[in-house]
Amino acid sequence: MRATVSGTHFAPEAVPFPTVKPHHSSRQLTAIHRKSLVVCAFLVLQPAVAGAQPAAQQPGSVEIGTYGQITRVDPSQARFESLAPLSLGIRGTVNLHHHLAAELEASTGVADGITPPFKRRYNQLVARGTYTAPLSDFSGLVLGVGIARSDYEVTYNFGPSVLLGIRTVIRGRYALRSDVIFNRLPTSGAKEFGIRTGLQTVLGPFVGPTTRDRKRGALTMQEPGSIEGSLFLQQWRLNPIWNLQNGQAIGARVGTFITSRSALEVETTYGRQRVAVGGRNGASVGPLVAGQTFRVTTFAFRYAYNLPVGARTALIGAVGPVRSSYEYVDHWGASAVGGARFALTRDLHVRADVSANYLPTERVVDVSARIGLSVLSRPGR
């Protein structure tokens, strides 16, 4: 279209279209795209990497392992030629929460004695709780506190134990664990310092209550990782070989459920029993004095199975090793328990059972009846 002024024709002046210069060069845009892809990949992979942390174990999973240990013992108690005997041990751990666990370990070794017997066993039995703090995607710092029993064959002592260690995943479910430990044995004033390293692997996590259990509302079924703490009273029926009366004892038990029905339990009992017949021998010692009392203790580790019978009741069967101490003599053996639990509430149960401890070195059986209360807790739930 043309415009005219005074009959004169003219074409309008062409107005140039404004040009926009890019803020970034093609090379800069490529770099930006690469950074964006890295950020997206990180956001996608971050949960998977976090899940690989060894500290983030599933509640109810179990770890088993073995280790070698060198321990600096107290010469006044151990009476060994070597002040740093070597020993081999096994460890079982139940993960209660992503960072909390309970573990039981036992180690044994042989050392030369400076007095008879000239070959002596050095045994350690430790129960502890641990907390694992993540250090990286594949390693964690392990802190532990518990109770240790150190046995030098001719004497033994109990005391508190602390642990500091590093757990490093080497492949899949396998990890390297290295620790330093310190045991303080107050009855004798002895101190022990140990260094060890070993391998362990993870089993589980195991399944929780079944659909049938949930429909029935079975209060005796527990989530994997649940903790059971118990206190109970016990009546002994000791074998006559010990020449001790059948008296009472008190006991404590801590268990951790690895499935809805299966649990691992650690149990200890303590009592003082009077001499039955004065002037007569007890096992492995001379004549006992009438009226004298002797300390009788047990320490047991068992696998327990709970069979639900209705919504509030379950039958219990448990088996495992036991160490029985009669103050003047110690014996290892096998222990079996049969009983029942009744749920007052979901977290408070009454438990009654009968235990039988078979000690093969003396070929005797000690029997006891117990009843007590159990409290259930679920860390992190």
Image (spheres, grey):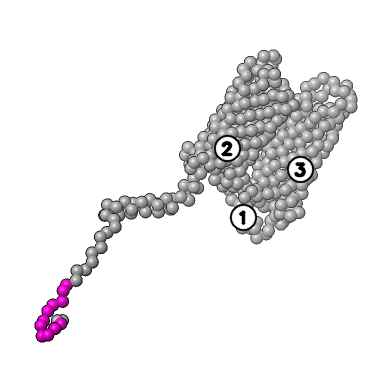
Of the residues shown, which amino acid type is indicated by label 1?
Thr
Look at the numbered disc 3 and give the secondary structure of its residue.
strand
Amino acid bearing label 3: Leu
What residue span does the magenta drawing correspond to?
3-14
At a point 16% along the width and 74% down the height, the residue shown is 13
> Which callout, 2 or 1, points at the residue further toward the start of the chain?
2
Q: Which of pointers 3 and 1 indicates the residue nearer the eye?
A: 3
> Quadrant where the N terminus lies?
bottom left
Q: Name the residue under label 2.
A: 142
* Residue at the far front in the pictured view: 6
In terms of sequence position, does the residue under pointer 3 or pointer 1 come before the other? 1
Which disc is residue 231 wearing?
A: 3
Mark 1 neighbour density, 10 Å: few (under 14) some (14–19) many (20 or more): few
The percent coordinates of residue 243 (x first, y second) are 84, 27
Q: Could you say which quadrant of the image residue 18 lies in?
A: bottom left
Q: Where residue 220 sits: x, y (%)?
A: 70, 52
Of residues 130 and 224, the one nearer the viewer is 130
| Residue pictured at 54% horizontal, 30% vertical | 197
Residue 210's tag is: 1
